[in-house]
Image: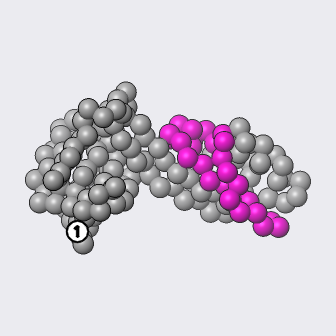
Amino acid sequence: MQRVFSLLVDNNPGVLSRISGLFSRRGYNVDSITAGVTADIRFTRITIVASGDELILSQIEKQVRKLEDVREIKVLQPETSVYRELVMVKIRANAEQRSDIVSVADIFRAKIVDVEKDSLMIELTGNQSKIDAFLNLLDGYEILELARTGITGLSRGSKDVTYFE
């Protein structure tokens, strides 16, 4: 079972280290973790995707909630949230292959962000299944490098937005 946690934390040095340390000390599995400053520079939003059974996932939520820097923790449910992930892929491509790869990128509304004589770099944003489907279609090509950000997400609507003074 997989769960997406959205944390709002104080933007203090070492906060990400303390949170990831909690996971490693307890042996919890982190599938992905993303972090970035919010519109209010006092706070950072951290999105953690964790795997485990119901007991482990509820323990993760309780343990994270106890950390001093954590202001809020939400479980992002798929039906009431929006998740996105970014992938950048560098593909070996000669002149003959380039147009086929660009066609696949166009189908997924991906962007060509760099072109060299022997390679293309493509950027794609979407949910995990879109990213996976795109990468599956690139199976016959040589992927030179690949970077995925991991999931980030927010709950839909404005009813559960938290404001701090």
Residue depicted at x 57% and y 38%: 130
Q: Is residue 52 left or right of residue 116?
A: left
Whether 130 is among the magenta residues is yes
Q: Is residue 20 left or right of residue 110?
A: left
Residue depicted at x 79% and y 59%: 93
Q: Position of residue 99 (x, y in %)?
A: 84, 49
- Count numbered badges in the picture: 1
Helix, strand or loop at disc 1?
loop
Question: Where on the picture, by quarter, is residue 39?
Answer: bottom left
Residue 13: tell me if it is visible. Answer: yes
| Magenta-drawn segment | 108-134
How crowded pointer 1 is (Cα within 10 Å; few <14, some 14-19, many 20+) is rated as few
Whether 131 is among the magenta residues is yes
Residue that label 1 marks: 12
Residue type beneath disc 1: Asn
Q: In the image, is residue 84 above or below residue 121? A: above
Q: Position of residue 103 (x, y in %)?
A: 78, 43
Residue depicted at x 34% and y 32%: 157
Residue 44: tell me if it is visible. Answer: no
Question: Where on the picture, by quarter, is residue 58?
Answer: top left
Most extreme residue toward the right is 96
Residue placed most toward the observer, 85 or 62: 85
Q: Quadrant of the N terminus?
A: top left
Most extreme residue toward the top is 79
Most extreme residue toward the front is 165
Q: In the image, is residue 141 above or below residue 51? A: below
Residue depicted at x 15% and y 53%: 165
Residue placed most toward the observer, 13 or 131: 13
